[in-house]
Image (spheres, grey):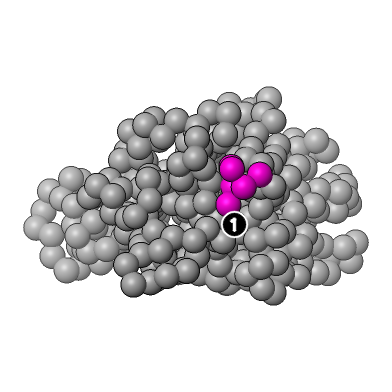
Amino acid sequence: MEFIEKLNSLSAKIRQQGAAIQTEEATKNAFVMPFINTVLGYDVFDPMEVTPEYVCDIGTKKGEKIDYAILKDGEVQILIECKKIGEPLNINHASQLFRYFHVTNARISILTNGQVYKFFTDLDAPNKMDEKPFLELDLLDIDEYAIPELVKLTKSAFDVESIINAAGELKYVSQIKKVIATQLSVPDEDFVKLIASRVYDGIITQKVRDQFAGLTRKAAAQFLNDQVNERLKSAMSGSISTISAAPSQEASASEEKTEENKVITTLEEMEGFHIVKAIVRSVVDAKRIVQRDTQSYCGILLDDNNRKPICRLHFNRNQKYIGIFDQEKNETRHPIESLDEIYNFADQLRDTVGLYI
C-alpha cells in the first residue's frame, strides 16, 4: 500500500505542476528524480547509486552522456533517458539508450518524459536493446498490473533475473492487450469475418460483413460493460445494476434505431459512468442512475429522465470534459485529464442529485 501511495503522490504532483514545466531539465528535477528516489528508492544524491549525466564513450563518440545511470556494486544496472513532459516517446527518442545499452552491463533501460515510463531489455538479441518496451507506466493512468513488476525494480527488491524472466510475457501481453483494445473499438475486416464465421451459418458476403461490423462493435461494448459491472460489484458493497438501455420516451423508434447505429459507448465512458454512480449512490439508490449515450456526449440521468440530468461526459474529443449542472439545469463544462478527476466534482454531483429528490 505504501508503494501505491508513493505512485499516487507523484501522480498528483504531475497533475498540479505538469502544465508549468517547460524544459527537459525541469522535468527531470520535478518528476524523474522523485520517481527514482521516492518510488524506486535509490539515493539520487549518492553517485555510487545514481549517476546523473553518465558518460559512456562509444567508439569515436566521446563524452556523450545518458541522463541517469543506476548502479549496484559499481555496475550499471539501469539506464534512464529523459525527455520533456508532454513530448511523445517513440523509438527515435531512444537512440542514445540503444548505443549505451550495448556497451554497459545494464539489462534494463528506461525512456521517460516524467509522466510515461517505457521499460526495455534485451529479449530479442543479447546485449541489444529491444525496439519495443516490455512494460509501460503512465503515472496519470496507472495500470494495476504494472505495479508488481515495477516493485521488482526498486532498490530493496531489485532482482534483474526475475525481471528478465517476466519481461517476455509482459511484453507480449501488453501488445496483445493493445490489439484486443483496437479490435473491440474499431474491428478490422479480418476480425469481423472471424466473428461472423463463428456465429453465422450462411455465406459471408460483403453485406454480411458490413452488418457484423456494427454488431461486433455493439457486442464488444456490452461485453466490456459487463466486465466493468462485475469488477465494481466485487469492489463495492451492495448490488450494482447493469447499464440500462431503456430508450428515451421522447425519441421515436426510428430515431432510436438510427442513433443506436451511430453511437459507440467507449470503455472510458462506461468507467466514467460507474465512477459517477459510485459517487452519488450515497444519496440515491444506484439502480436509479442511468447512462444514455449519444453521438456528442454520454449523459448520466436520474430515473432515465432527460429532465433530471446529473452530468455529461464529453469524451469524444482530444480534451475531455465533464459537464456539471446547476439549479437552473445550465451545464458548465470542466476540462479533465483523467477519469480520476471526476472525483473532484463529487460534492457537485451529489448536490445535483439532491435537487431532484
Residue found 63% across the figure and 69% down from its top? 24
Vertically, is 199 above or below 80? above
Q: Which residues are magenta?
A: 46-51
Looking at the picture, which amino acid does disc 1 mark? Pro
Q: Is residue 263 magenta?
A: no
**Camera-side residue of 227 and 174:** 174
Q: Could you tell whether 58 is left or right of 51 in the image?
A: left
Vertically, is 147 above or below 179? above
Residue found 53% across the figure and 46% down from its top? 70
Residue found 24% across the figure and 57% down from its top? 192
Q: Quadrant of residue 6?
A: top right
Q: Which residue is mark 1?
A: 52
**Camera-side residue of 88 and 52:** 52
Vertically, is 282 above or below 357? above
Residue 271 rendering spot, x and y as whole percentages: 59, 48
Number of marks present in the image shown: 1
Tell me which secondary structure the magenta stretch mostly adopts: loop
Q: Does any portion of residue 337 appear in the rendered image?
A: no
Q: Does any portion of residue 283 appear in the rendered image?
A: yes
Label 1: element kind: strand
Quarter the C terminus occupies: top right
Quarter the N terminus occupies: top right
Residue found 76% across the figure and 62% down from its top? 17
Residue 148 rendering spot, x and y as whole percentages: 51, 32
Q: Could you tell whether 51 is left or right of 102 in the image?
A: right
